[in-house]
Amino acid sequence: MARFFYNLTLLLLLPYVGLHLLLRSRRQPEYLRHVGERFGFYPSPQRGEGVIWLHAVSVGETRAAQPLVTALKARYPGHRILLTHMTPTGRQASEELFGDAVHRAYLPYDYPFAVQRFLAHFRPAVGVIMETELWPNLVSACKAQGIPLLLANARLSEKSARRYARFPNLTRSALRDLAGIAAQTEQDAARLTALGAPKADVLGNVKFDILPPPEQLALGETLRKWIGPRPVLLAASTREGEEALLFEALARHPLGGALFVVVPRHPQRFDEVAALAVKAGFVVQRRSGNAPVGAQTQVLLGDSMGEMFAYYAACDVAFVGGSLLEYGSQNLIEACAAGRPVLIGRSTYNFAQAAGEALACGAARQVSSAEELVEAAGALLDDAGLRQRMGKAGLEFAAHHRGATEKTLALISRAMR
């Protein structure tokens, strides 16, 4: 009965799907590309190769999939890797990370007819959903067709658990139909089992296995040369509302001659953030200009994709966005892996355990407001010894937690057998 009402709701929402895509396209025109794929219509299938399918909804999940994709290609050279996404930014991140080494497409909406077309077209040997995204019809169809579907690198915050708990029958059924679950932490596993999962293995977080690529480190050195000798404060993966707070705090409490580099999480907001910086009275330059940073430039807008490790390599102190306001924080692990002292806000539910351990080992410091962030950044920029100690702690913290990729690969291999 729960599935009936779920599908009835999807059917009633069908007329609004096109409107939704149209509205999203006003900020991201890419939403109007490959629309057919969202309903299970794909180009002619390529036969003759087994397909290993990974679903990464957007940018964060796509980046998290990187070590797993690399390991799968090495373990199964005769198979094709299919990456599916739900957002254009996720798809773009896939292109930048993997190029033609993988096949990519949009995962269709969870209509039974669309799901059936998707599975009939690609015929995956196994499916892997990165982090946590449960689609009842998709999970049920995979179970019916004998396609093992795994939840990998699974995380479930208390907020998300409460949302899934509103639909107990659908959630329980979907979790029980999965072929396996690899949870990041004991807390994630406990929440998943409380919702009905028969078992959840705690294998760690594959994001710890993402190492700074040498070409990104080299680009970071180039950026640093373009910036010159002045100190650099980076605000990485900032979310809507955070940039305005940071610009206001910096205007009230300038950091001497330091350069403030801000990299918004979503590319459709680049122009908006540039306008906010100008409105706050700062001299702004864009990374996309691909030129040395002017002596008068106060804010460098990181309006590029796929260069986050380069920004970390070029900075002295890194603030990880999504944590100053209630977004749950973006990935602080990359900043630690780059050996940079990290500042985070109070909202860290997406990386609760990682944030707690980074704070405990001295790799990160927590702030409650933009003013406190600017004050803490100023203190760090004035203390090279403290920056070095925090950066070393971050490197050790990241190294200590590596190994989830190999464990997840073993889980996928067992499912394929």
Image (spheres, rainbow, N blue to C red):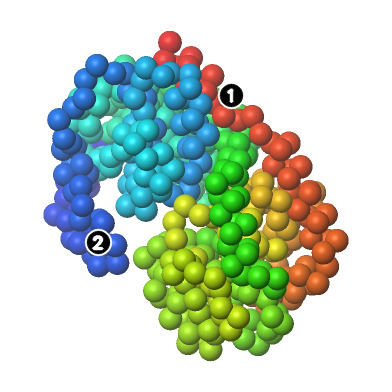
Residue 342 appears anywhere in the view:
yes
| Foreground of the two, 161 or 67 | 67
| Residue 381: quarter of image | bottom right
Asked whether the residues under the numbered discs 2 and 1 touch, taking CB atoms below 8 Å apart as contact, a structural biologist would say no
> Residue 300's spot in the image, x, y percent?
54, 72
Mark 2–mark 1 Cα distance, whole angstroms, equals 39 Å
> Residue 372's spot in the image, x, y percent?
71, 74
Nearer the camera: disc 2 or disc 1: 2
Above or below 266: residue 147: above
Image quadrant where one finds the C terminus: top left
| Foreground of the two, 16 or 227 | 227
- Report the amino acid beneath label 2: Pro
Residue 171 appears anywhere in the view:
no
Q: Which residue is mark 2?
A: 29
Residue at 79% x, 60% y is 387
Residue 407's label in the rendered image is 1
Residue at 28% x, 33% y is 137
Local crowd size for mark 1, using a 10 Å CA cut-off: few (<14), some (14–19), many (≥20):
some
Above or below 194: residue 58: below
